[in-house]
Image (cartoon, helix red, strand yellow):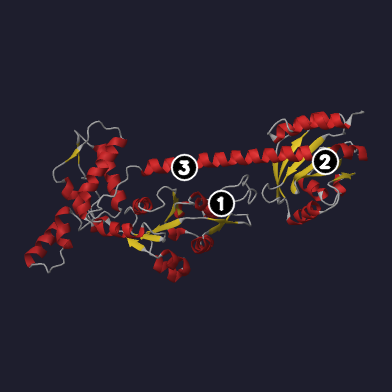
Amino acid sequence: MKINEKDFFREATLRICGSLDIDKALHQCFLYIRDYIPADRIGLSVFDYNTGDPSNLSVFVAGGKDDKSKNIPLPDDIQRKLRRWLNDKGPAFRIIDRISEDGILGPISRLRKWKETSGMVMRIMLEGKILGSLIVGSFSGVKYTENHLRLLGSLNEPFAIALSNSLQHLELQRIRDRLADDKRYLQEEMQRLAGEEIIGADFGLKQVMELVLQVAPLGSPVLLLGETGVGKEVIANAIHNASRRRKGPFIKVNCGAIPDTLIDSELFGHEKGAFTGAFEQKRGRFERADGGSIFLDEIGELPPKAQVRLLRVLQEKIIERVGGNEFHKVDIRVIAASHRNLEKMLEDGSFREDLYFRLKVFPIMIPALRKRHMDIPALVQYFIQKKSKEMGLIDIPGITAGAMDTLLAYHWPGNVRELENAIERALILAKNGIINFDDLPFQAGNRPDTVDMKRDNKPSTLDAVVTRHIIETS
């Protein structure tokens, strides 16, 4: 079909640049140019917008029943050939008689099981920057001519401009979605942490809070140690809120709750195509914490490889995403916590010595609840108020006479977390607006009427020994 090349250029350009949606624009262009250039399929391969790296192609296809964008990871040998062609100073477009025999597209076609086609290939460049390539193919094996190639070549600049605009639009959408995701994540964290106060700051945790106020304004790593349930996360939150980073994010990571196969991706993020199922780039927790603090709970559960990468973050303040080859600077403060004996783990080789001493710049030991009984009455009142509100109780229950003595006498192996759960259970079982704690699992020798005698380290009198023996065997 005869055509004025200026008219062809104008009409094709209107369709190419008619939408920021690459799929839609390519489809409209295909419907027009196939009347002038033999084409059963058009494929637009897009390289990494920032680096031009073709290691993982995004392919947009028009023509046929399976018109949709795809991601195609390429083997190293094909990447090398493709890079050589991209950097070649020769013509930006060429004719291919049989795609299976082409040095670059042949291996890709066999890898992707494409049909045999003849075609034309055009590099898409804008201001010296390679954005991708365009393939026009014919399943009937039509012989493309120099006239066909000239018509296609006239569209190089419109395709480049349209593709650049589309990629920038996609990048803006990605940034918007990322910010929305960050906002939602931080709102959930703030809602969860809202109302958390440190009960015992003036009594059993007074020394801990003094250390918190000393280290909070600095940027040093902090290592929180103590039994499970003592409130290490609350103390970590206090350090963040008292620091210069309080307006930045506070990201919590439970290192023991993430499978070993996912820990690197969760902490450090991954690039698109880094592994099966990685369909898009993902930022890790360290990048989310940029400008703020990250709380690594149960640090002793980190697998050895993740420990090595964490050490690099602490030393150099850089991270490398899984599947990536670029380093990203992060401005974060690391607060780690563990209930395990890390020094013992050093001896058996399950925890790195260099990482341990890098984390142990400023250790804070949080005492167990049984060592700060004076905090229990305030904690009980706080949890009764909190849990009653969560359960929608109109009237706040009271506690039976002697119940506080029972709570003070119990040894609380689960610490503050166990106390919180005990109060919630007691509220559920409350009768007539009164709660008691008769179901606490006292162990032998830990009954309310004997615990004080056991705590007394002074020599016992004969009468005291006889009395204790009668009570314990009754």
Q: Position of residue 319 (x, y in %)?
A: 55, 57
Are the residues tagged 1 and 3 within 8 Å (C-beta)? no
* Residues at marks 2 and 1, CA–CA distance in whole angstroms: 36 Å
**Is the residue 378 above or below the residue 444 in the image?**
above
Q: Residues within 10 Å of mark 3 (few under 14, many from 20)?
A: some
- The residue type indicated by label 3 comes to Tyr
Q: Is residue 267 left or right of residue 131?
A: left
Mark 2 or mark 3, earlier in chain: 2
| Location of mark 3 (residue) | 185
**Comparing labels 2 and 1, the label whose residue is closer to the camera:** 1
Q: Residue 115 bears which disc, if any?
A: 2
Q: Residue at x 88, y 31 (%)?
A: 36
Q: Position of residue 195 (x, y in %)?
A: 32, 42
Which type of secondary structure does the marked residue at label 1 adopt?
loop
Task: Identify which amino acid the numbered label 1 is placed on.
Answer: Gly
- Secondary structure under the numbered disc 3 in the rendered image: helix
> In the rendered structure, which amino acid carries the disc numbered 2?
Lys
Pick the front one: 409 or 467: 409
Sequence order check: which comes first, mark 2 or mark 1? 2
Where residue 362 appears, as percent x and y from the top left, is 37, 64
Q: Is residue 154 visible?
A: yes
Q: Quadrant of the C terminus?
A: bottom left
For this view, does 115 lie left or right of residue 408?
Answer: right
Task: Report which residue position mark 1 lands on.
Answer: 269
Point out the tag, 1 or 3, that comes first from the N-terminus.
Answer: 3
Quarter that holds the N terminus: top right
Could you say which is closer to the camera, residue 205 or residue 474? Answer: 205
